[in-house]
Amino acid sequence: MTDAQFLAWLQSSAAYRCVLIEAAARVDGVETMIYMATRSYTTSPADSPANTQYLPIATVGTLFTERLSLDGDGALSTGDLEIDNTAGVRDAWAGGSYVWKNREIRAYIGDIRWPRADFRMIFNGIVADIAPSGRSALLLKLRDKLQRLNTAITEAKLGGDTEQKDSLLPFAIGQVSNITPLPINPATLTYGYHCASAEGVIANEARDNGAPVAMASNPAAGTVTLESTPAGAVTLSVKGDNTGGYCDTAATMCRRLATRYGKDADRFTDADLDLANLAAFDAAHPQPMGLYSTDRLNVLAACQMLLGSLGAQLVMSRLGLMRLIQVALPGTGTPFVIRPEHMVETQGTSTLQPAGRTEVVGAVKLGFAKNWTVQDAGTLANLPESHKALFADEWLTTTRTDATTLATYRLNAEPVQIDTMLLTRADADAEAQRRLDLWKVPRTTYEFDGVPELLTLELGQAVTVYSPRFGMAAGVSGIVISLAPDWNTGRVKVGFLV
């Protein structure tokens, strides 16, 4: 079935819409696939799965809402699926013999007259849990697949019998400066800075209270061994993880984190990634970065620290593919044109309406080039004063201001610092200016109920919107920031930023 044929079906009043649900659960200790639908549907012997009955017990409206965060923090998207439990016939599903948590769930839409292969996926995610909804229904709590990344990067501990035996092995990715490594073996003066193979120590030197000292490097183990007992704090500047090659850009580091770290069973494979999107993002955003952790940092949080440095975030597509999206205007790519005829009317009035307005920003201050070990200048013997100051400050900073905006809106000229994982002043300057240009004018978010044609929209997609209201008569440029498809009606609530 072609895209055009599928769209024509969505728009047809003669369609017999049916949503198929395939949800995994552990039932009495056995991993089991449970088949549900909004209408009765049974596959044929030629289908896959063959001769399978989908129980007509599911209620699906707005199954899931996709949303971009304008503050850049990112978040797991959520939704619900209602299951019929009249007279308690499925009480056991919410009991101890059924385990739904962190199991996969997929949804497909099509016509009850179609073969199974013609149904199209509309959701690919995770079940957070199940809960009763009154006496006659159950609710499956849904999350997108980012839930799988909500797990510690590593839980490997040093072990042995030293005082540090319960410490997590450090994790380093990209380039990080002046980190404090973990003492691995006090007897041999061996220190660890990464839990796996690393690129190595920058300039091939360690520091003792800021002063360079001789050492032997073992990048394959992510360790160094000092040649003499240190007098004070040992620090290193390193290039981290190189399992599969060294990486230091947001896209490549997020891909590395998602596919090689976290729990083995929850790691993504390339089949879970929108590889074209990642490649395009990497080409557009080659800024080097770095991240270091000695605590229980999870994969999702680490990715968002990196992407947040660029005003971007991690999202999952409707098909369950990881994508990277930067909130920016104008959006990238050819805009999708939205006209009044794409907007559903209620009693003759368009559903287009304002949903919110952003705060105006007259100045942006970013922290960059993080010093991962802040040291008192008094402990840094034999160093030039200018170097002591660098070791004593956690961040270098850059500030970009717009005098006209500050005066017009009577804003405070000293903004709150936003910390990033960027390394160079040039990159920090450019990002601060980009954010200032984006937010120094008031931005408005709008919502409307869209016709079936708009079910193909994606988060972050560029749009040009026309309407006789809200100054849109000549068209305005925007990006899609939320999508809430209703598969019962074939409509979608669209949110966009202009």
Image (cartoon, rainbow, N blue to C red):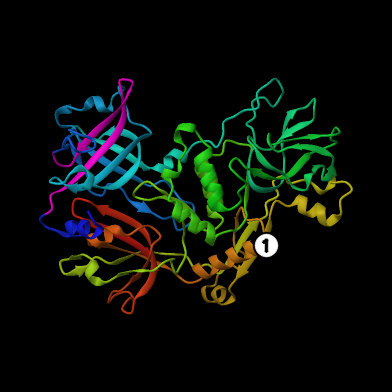
Q: Residue furthest bottom?
A: 474
Q: Quadrant of residue 310?
A: bottom right
Q: Position of residue 336 (x, y in %)?
A: 33, 67
Q: Is residue 450 visible?
A: no
Image side of residue 76 versus residue 250, left or right: left
> Disc count in the image?
1
Image side of residue 211 versus residue 150, left or right: right
* Residue at point 62%, 42% (across, down): 242
Residue pointed to by mark 1: 425
Which residue range is magenta in the image? 15-40
Q: Position of residue 214 (x, y in %)?
A: 84, 40
> Vertically, is 349 above or below 380?
below
* Residue at point 67%, 62% (across, down): 425
Image side of residue 131 versus residue 419, left or right: left
Q: Residue furthest right?
A: 382
Q: Position of residue 391 (x, y in %)?
A: 77, 50
Q: Secondary structure at mark 1?
A: helix
